[in-house]
Image: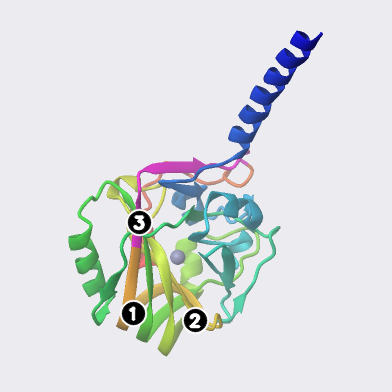
């Protein structure tokens, strides 16, 4: 009887360990993405994943919201929504996203940044991190002379393509502001799935202003960055949102127009 009981106990311990291991997610070295940029470009604005679930894959990231209702920036596990009224909102965990990228952000050694604008920063970062095949997360905390951002207006079906929506985007010139830029440098090979090159979002330190970064002039700041060699893409479960979208189309030109 004792023998049977101890065997039962060891089986139970093994089963419990397996269950615990399976439940313990590790996102180390991994960038997780919801849907694809081409789906978004084509007008797939229906939310596919709740913000609460998205946070299981990372504590920092960027994206947008259901119905393209503003720009998303996630910092230190907090999700922020910058709508086209220029204001910052705190979405609920149940609010969904049609496109987002997140990582568990672990920085390498922080670097002090000299005053620079967006294109000077790109040159500098490209020099520092020449591994163009990897994903890089970029976080700049600093004082900015100016940050020019944009946000997009909430859409109503039937959805227009993003390149047409972007024509009515709102731009914000935020001067003399402290805040954080977060985003990614994605490899060129990601074309069609994500935005190749730099894609950055901004939020002010007082969490009142932000958006998708078009231009910036940094006065002084700190750069933290991390590289990611694992790419996880979570696609919509059904084709409901994608039905009328040609996913094979090369939208590089439109992406360039919308993002840069
Ligand atoms: Zn953006």
Rendered location of residue 139, percent (x, y): 39, 67
| Circle nearer the viewer, 3 or 1 | 3
Residue 112: which quarter of the image?
bottom left
* Distance of label 1 from label 2 (alpha carbons): 15 Å
Q: Is residue 32 left or right of residue 129?
A: right
Q: Which residue is mark 2?
A: 205
Rendered location of residue 41, percent (x, y): 47, 56
Q: Nearer the viewer, residue 157 or 15?
A: 15
Q: Which residues, given as a range, are shown in magenta? A: 225-239
Question: Can you say whether 208 is above or below 240 in the image?
Answer: below
Point out the tag, 1 or 2, that comes first from the N-terminus.
2
Rendered location of residue 122, percent (x, y): 25, 67
Dominant secondary structure, magenta: strand
Point out the tag, 2 or 3, that comes first from the N-terminus.
2
Question: Can you say whether 21 is above or below 203 in the image?
Answer: above
* Residue at 25%, 82% in the rendered image: 115
Residue found at the very far left of the displayed protein: 127
Residue found at the very far bottom of the displayed protein: 176
Q: Which residue is mark 1?
A: 216
Question: What secondary structure is found at the residue carrying circle 2?
Answer: loop
* Distance of label 3 from label 1 (alpha carbons): 21 Å
**Total label count?**
3
Question: What secondary structure is found at the residue carrying circle 1?
Answer: strand
* Distance of label 2 from label 3 (alpha carbons): 22 Å
At label 3, counting other C-alpha atoms closer than 10 Å, the crowd grade (few under 14, some 14-19, many 20 or more) is many
Pointer 1 residue Cβ closer than 8 Å to ligand 1: no
Q: Quadrant of the C terminus?
A: bottom left
Q: Which residue is mark 3?
A: 226
Q: Nearer the viewer, residue 50 or 6?
A: 6
* Residue at 49%, 55% in the rendered image: 102
Rendered location of residue 198, percent (x, y): 33, 62
Q: Is residue 183 magenta?
A: no
């Amino acid at each position: 009887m004792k023998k049977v009981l101890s065997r039962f106990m060891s089986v139970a311990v093994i089963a419990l360990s397996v269950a615990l291991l399976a439940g313990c997610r590790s996102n180390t070295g991994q960038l997780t993405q919801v849907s694809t940029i081409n789906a978004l470009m084509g007008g797939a604005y229906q939310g596919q994943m709740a913000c609460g679930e998205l946070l299981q894959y990372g504590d920092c990231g960027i994206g947008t919201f259901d119905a393209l209702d503003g720009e998303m920036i996630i910092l230190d596990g907090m999700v922020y929504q910058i709508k086209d009224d220029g204001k910052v909102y705190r979405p609920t965990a149940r609010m969904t996203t049609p496109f987002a990228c997140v990582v568990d952000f672990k920085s390498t050694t922080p670097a002090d940044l000299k005053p620079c604008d967006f294109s000077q920063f790109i040159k500098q970062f490209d020099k520092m991190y020449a591994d163009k095949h990897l994903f890089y997360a970029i976080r700049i905390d600093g004082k900015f002379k100016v940050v020019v951002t944009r946000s997009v207006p909430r859409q109503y079906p039937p959805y227009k393509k993003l390149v047409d929506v972007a024509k009515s985007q709102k731009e914000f010139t935020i001067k003399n502001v402290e805040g954080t830029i977060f985003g990614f440098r994605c490899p060129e090979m990601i074309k069609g799935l994500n935005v190749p090159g730099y894609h950055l979002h901004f939020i002010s330190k007082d969490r009142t202003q932000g958006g998708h970064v078009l231009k910036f002039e940094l006065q002084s700041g700190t750069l933290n960055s991390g590289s990611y060699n694992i790419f996880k893409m979570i696609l919509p479960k059904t084709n409901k949102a994608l039905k009328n979208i040609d996913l094979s189309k090369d939208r590089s030109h439109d992406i360039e127009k919308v993002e840069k």
